[in-house]
Image (cartoon, helix red, strand yellow):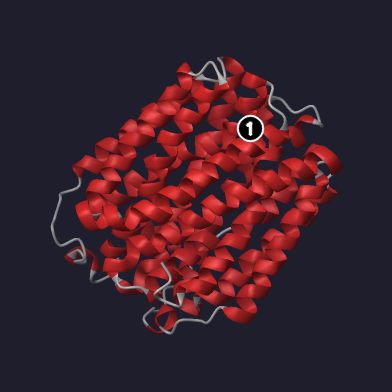
Amino acid sequence: MFKNKALIPIAVVVFVDLLGFSIILPLLPYYASTFAASPEMIGYLVATYSVFQFLASPILGGMSDKYGRRPLLIYSQFGSFVGYVLLGLAHSLPLLFLARIVDGISGGNISIASAYIADVTEPKDRSGAYAIIGIAFGLGFLVGPLIGGTLAEHFGYSAPAYVSAAFSFSSALLTIFYLKEHTHSRDAAQATGLNYYSRIFEYLKDAKLRSYLLVFLFFALPFSLYVSMASLYMKMEFNATPQQVGLFLAFVGLLGIIYQGALIRPLVKKIGDLKLMRIGMVAMAVGIGSIYFVTHWWQLLLTATVFSFGTGVVRPTLSSLITTAAPPNRKGGVLGVSSMLESASRSLSPIMGGWIIALYAPNVIGLAGAVLTIMGVYFAFSVKDNRDLHVIEPGLRGL
């Protein structure tokens, strides 16, 4: 995994940053409930961070092409630090919303980290390298929810927010002192201006890149629905405590580590990025759709096992396919667009999930997630299975 030594500092930075994020995510419904928030309002609260990240990510990704990855990562991490501090200080629902807005405006770290990985790896090695982010997610969700749930049970909901702030501050320090700027991230980039949103339409002109981005959208929507609604679903369906939610998410995190740490490289080598991505999308549809039929706790663990396999193999392979199709000096911009799509998904999914739970029942989110994933399966199979997946589309060479 770490034959390329340039990946070590970015792996540490991503893990520490995601650890802070994973500590507070499952606690937001419980935190908001102390201010008498309804399921719909909890959905809006969870979505707030992503709405503002949606607006900021393509700008941050494009700026990282022009000014370098490192300074934009530092900005993003300090923004998260401020947002978590405000979250800990919140004593009303409006202040909870403000804290999530501040964090969202600076929340482009994953797209920038993905662009950095693309800078320092060859196309043939990218799926394995992108698995680093997946493993960081897994480790974060293995450790973070356990920390957050335990702190919330014994010290209240503000304590996890302050601990998350400490992790974000640590992540920024790691970036400042240990992460080196790779020359390609700026030398190959051309001056682009700030109108990054218009680039979306340029990227969508290329058929293959358009298909990959649509797959990413319908990967991100059900994944966001699953992650953002897990704690509210478990709270209402099983009367779970924050600590129990933390244990479940830790199990999901462990699955992510196993799948991405042990399976990605051999599977990609054997069947390729595209076929593995398709298999992963089908597994996601089966896993999330099964939630509708869950009646006991152990059944939820089975659905998580299948769904986590799907997400575990889709994210790194799809990220590799997207960056391979993108021109070398636009990787940050394209990943900024994919991050924007993910932010849009995290904006829509919690709102949709909150209303579904309020109007129907918690388990109906499984059916909604399955429908969304099936659309992603359709687009995944619409991509032509070219043997040379590392050739840049001619239509993008002039961008």
Seen in the image, is 125 located left or right of residue 147? Answer: left
Q: Residue at x 41, y 43 (%)?
A: 311
Q: Quadrant of the C terminus?
A: bottom left
Q: Residue at x 59, y 80 (%)?
A: 178
Q: Residue at x 43, y 29 (%)?
A: 288
Q: Quadrant of the N terminus?
A: bottom left
Query: Where 294 falls versus 129 (above or below)?
Result: above
Q: Is residue 156 visible?
A: yes
Q: Position of residue 69 (x, y in %)?
A: 51, 74
Q: Position of residue 367 (x, y in %)?
A: 43, 22
Q: Position of residue 24 (x, y in %)?
A: 69, 46
Query: Where 124 falls versus 370 (above or below)?
Result: below
Q: Is residue 193 visible?
A: no
Say what secondary structure mark 1 lies in: helix
Query: Where 215 falls versus 190 (above or below)?
Result: above
Q: In the image shown, does 182 or 1 lie closer to the viewer? A: 1
Q: Quadrant of residue 125?
A: bottom left
Q: Position of residue 108 (x, y in %)?
A: 55, 60
Q: In the image shown, does 305 or 16 lie closer to the viewer? A: 305
Seen in the image, is 147 located left or right of residue 188? Answer: right
Amino acid residing under circle 1: Ser
Give the residue number, with chain letter if any, for mark 1: 231
